[in-house]
Image (cartoon, rainbow, N blue to C red):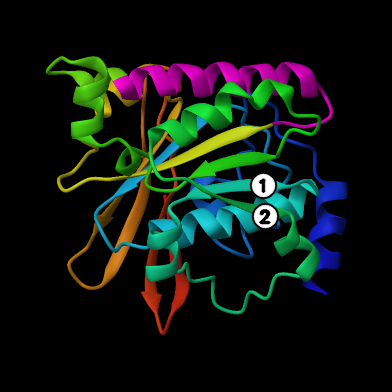
């Protein structure tokens, strides 16, 4: 019933364009089940960042997003991550969600060890015969070792330089994919990062390359608030925010706040 209802609604709703979101659908809702998978096909072809403190469910949000993208697009999604981190902290799905085997088979897990793995993947991206609906990189900056970046570039801003070069490569690859896809669909890139304060450490870099940045903050009572912060590329803030929690190994959407 869930899959049938989803497909039926997708046929009835008009797809969002690359520059306009439908007023009743927020990006924040797309990280959860129900509201997000019932949404029109996601056509934002830019780069999106999800940043939050440790242990706030970022990997779970990314994986639920991957399921939603695979379900609504009918295409595959690439989930790039560290094998060790994923095995030690597997993602939790939204409560009541039981994705079909066909949807799960469209999520391709790719394990890498460092930023060189990201570079190699996107350097060859234009050679793909079938572009994914989305590429997701879990703990993006965790692959950039300060020491290895120093050895490679030999200056005090080596890690920042490595980040900029990879982000430029990613942007070029995603833009190429969307130019090739045309009206067939879109390919978007979703990254996650860990921050200790209110915003990502590399926010000044992200603002140059990323159109949509979403941050997560705890409320001190066991719940979290996921919200959009504006960037020069997006120009405006998204009005809606999602309040959620992780309970009994489930991702629980508590409310959508205006």
Residue 235 in sight: no
Q: Is residue 72 magenta?
A: no
Q: Which residue lies under the disc numbered 2? A: 107
Q: Secondary structure at mark 2?
A: strand
- The residue nearer to you, when weighing 104 against 226, is 104
Q: In the displayed structure, would residue 250 be above or below residue 138?
A: below
- The residue nearer to you, when weighing 44 against 21, is 44
Q: Which residue lies under the disc numbered 1? A: 77
Quarter of image, res 257: bottom left
C-alpha distance separating marks 1 and 2? 5 Å
Residue at figure coordinates x 67%, y 47% from the top left: 77
Tell whether 128 sits left or right of 146: right
Mark 1–mark 2 CB contact (< 8 Å): yes
Residue at figure coordinates x 53%, y 28% from the top left: 120
Where residue 20 appears, x then y in whole percent? 62, 27
Q: In the displayed structure, would residue 68 be above or below residue 49?
A: below
Q: In the displayed structure, would residue 201 be above or below residue 66?
A: above
Q: Secondary structure at mark 1?
A: strand
Where residue 114 appears, x then y in whole percent? 38, 39
């Amino acid at each position: 019933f869930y899959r049938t209802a989803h497909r039926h609604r997708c046929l009835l709703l008009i797809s969002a364009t690359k520059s306009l979101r439908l007023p009743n659908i927020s990006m924040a809702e797309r990280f959860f089940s129900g509201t997000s998978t019932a949404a029109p096909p996601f056509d934002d072809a830019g780069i999106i960042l999800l940043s939050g403190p440790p242990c706030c469910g970022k990997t779970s949000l990314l994986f639920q997003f991957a399921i939603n993208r695979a379900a609504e697009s009918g295409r595959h999604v690439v989930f790039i991550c560290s094998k060790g981190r994923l095995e030690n902290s597997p993602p939790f799905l939204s409560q009541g969600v039981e994705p079909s085997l066909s949807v799960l088979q469209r999520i391709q897990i790719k394990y890498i060890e460092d930023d060189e793995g990201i570079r190699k993947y996107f350097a060859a991206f234009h050679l793909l015969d079938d572009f994914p609906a989305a590429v997701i990189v879990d703990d993006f900056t965790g692959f950039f070792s300060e020491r290895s970046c120093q050895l490679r570039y030999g200056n005090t801003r080596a890690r920042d330089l490595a980040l900029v070069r990879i982000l430029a490569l990613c942007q070029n690859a995603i833009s190429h994919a969307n130019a090739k896809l045309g009206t067939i669909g879109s390919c978007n890139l979703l990254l996650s990062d860990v921050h200790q304060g209110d915003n990502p450490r590399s926010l000044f870099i992200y603002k140059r390359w990323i159109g949509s940045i979403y941050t997560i903050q705890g409320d001190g009572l066991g719940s979290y608030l996921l919200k959009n912060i504006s960037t020069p590329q997006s120009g405006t803030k998204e009005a809606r925010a999602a309040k959620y929690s992780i309970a009994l190994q489930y991702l629980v959407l508590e409310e959508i706040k205006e």
